[in-house]
Image: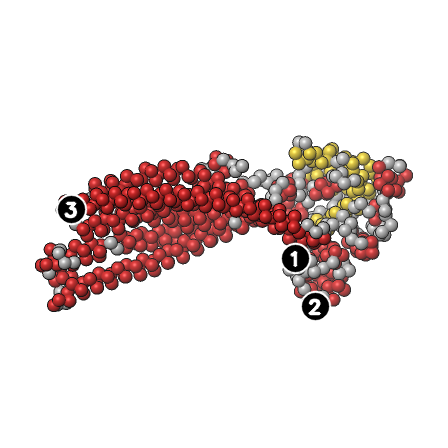
Amino acid sequence: MPPSSTDHHPPSVYGRVFRYFRPYLRPTLAGLGLTFVTTLISLLQPWPFKIIIDELLPGSAHYQAGAFTRTIAPWFGGPWEVRWNVLLLAGLLIAFHLVNGLLGLATAYLYIKVGLRALLQLRTDLFTTLNNLSLKFHDARRSADSSFRVAYDSQSLQTFYNKGFTNVFASGFMLVSTFAIMWSLDWVLTLLSLGVVPFVMWALKHYAGRIREESTAIQESESAVLQTVQEGMSSIRVVQAFGRERETVDDFFRQALASLRANLRLNFTNMWSSLMVSSLMAAGTAMLIYFGTLHVLDGTLTLGTLTVFVSYLAMLYTPIQNLTGVAWALEGAAAGAQRCFEILDAADDVKDAPAAVPLVAARGNIAFEDVSFHYTAERKILSAISLQIEAGESVAFVGGTGAGKSTLLSLVPRFYDPTEGRVLLEGLDLRSLTKRSVRDQISIVLQETVLFSTTVRENIAYGRPTATDAEIEEAARRAQAWDFIMAMPKGFDALVGERGSHLSGGQRQRIGIARAFLKDAPILLLDEPTSALDPSTEAGIMETLAGLMRGRTTLIITHRLATVHHLDKIVVLEHGKVVEVGRGPELVARGGAYAKLYRAGNFGAAEPVGR
């Protein structure tokens, strides 16, 4: 069920759209000036017809007297006078058309350029906001929906400018000018021509809300289609391995069918409303022709004037029809613009405080003071956790699935802020420090290293783009990645493929470790860095990680207890609470929660780290 108009189309949306065009006021005014000139030329176009009918055709008074030809073209003589004047007027029509076309081309280019510039700014704002919003925001929504808003909903800005603002001015000026000329020619016929306007306004109001809602439904269904495609393509190996191709295609078909139906509804509404408006215009034209013919027969109106009047009627109705189309286009664009502004208005629950200061350097002293965290009131993840971690300590967090380990680790780089309590770094509340400066002190190695579709060199240098080639290569050696990198055809300039698809799991992990070596931060976070690897690869990675951990405050999450059994400290979590803290052998001796995990685990796959 699409949201109501009051939910997704507040009055402020037009003002917010206008702010994106404010920097381009000068070129916009230039475009409006060109529009003014083209409108004036358009208003002149019917007059050559009037002159030909009333002055040059057989039966007119001036034709019989020959006065007109002597006035317009005295240099032509003989029987060719009328023909040359007709030729002159026809040439004038061509000139009007060419000048109008060239000015229209310049105006359109100017408007398109301004619209694209504003679109670039909106997309940049959206992408910047999405990059800065907390993980809680991203956890609660589909990534494809955010992508759709950046790539497609943002294009509504061009609709506002190119089909909205500029058309409103051009159509409005044409409407007023045409009305003034028609009134001067015959005010009675002018009033008759405007008789259909109230009905057009009713149609505009009647269909506006429906078009707005149906436009929103299309955008939501298209977003769902994009989500289905992204999930299907990113999971293609799983899809094919389980033979789920048909089901995946069926799911896509259902989403695409919903989009098709939404598009059909909107297009039918547009066509039906356009038919109603055009029918009203046809009725107004028929009335004008009928009563205009009576005026010609009565001798109160010349045939040429009636011809001009009919031409101006088309000019009068065209902007009215354009304005109704603009109104409906704006209703559709408003839905997309509002979806963009929903992103820009999203509250960042992990933002820098107004008085936040940068952390210049950290040794790695971390403290959790009575920390609790929950996504919602019903979904509590952590409860009253207090821990002290000294600089240089290696601490493992262990426990069952859903114990809160990853969430606790995510509080250190401020991916989330605690709902209650506080996290301290060097005795300072993280919320009193800028996020950027805190994250500069932290290196992270995840279970699945995220690589970008670029070179090995750029992936290693991702956390420190200013690093020299020598520093990048040294980091690769320390991560034991040198050999396989140099075995690749282009070495450090080899492309890793989408999400590192050209590399094995172990190779991707070593690139991630090289990235951490290069950043050389005092705090290291390891979240299941080897759980997806085979035992022999895991042993090599753990050996490399031992070198990376040396001299750094290290927080590690793992289910492989043998690899962390002899670390400085082990923290056991159950249901978001700390139930045990100590060294591995001590905790085994106590016979508590850790001892049960340790005895139940298969821990012979890798050598312990940090010894």
> Residue 390: image x %, image y %?
78, 43
Asked if one can make out residue 510 in the rendered structure from this viewpoint, the answer is no
Residue at mark 1: 498
Q: Amino acid at mark 3?
A: Leu
Q: Secondary structure at mark 1?
A: helix
Asked if labels 2 and 1 touch by Cβ distance under 8 angstroms, the answer is no
Q: CA distance from mark 3 to mark 2?
A: 90 Å
Residue at mark 3: 297
Name the residue furthest right: 589
Asked if labels 3 and 1 touch by Cβ distance under 8 angstroms, the answer is no
Write the residue at 65% across / 48% down: 247
Residue at mark 2: 489
> Residue 280: image x %, image y %?
32, 42
Sooner in the amino-acid sequence: mark 3 or mark 2: 3
Q: Please name which of the two marks, 1 or 3, marks the residue nearer to the observer.
A: 3
Looking at the image, residue 189 sits to the left or right of residue 119; the answer is: left
Write the residue at 13% across / 66% down: 79
Q: Please name which of the two marks, 1 or 2, marks the residue nearer to the observer.
A: 1
In this view, the residue in front, 601 or 122, is: 601
Q: Amino acid at mark 2?
A: Pro
Q: Amino acid at mark 1?
A: Glu
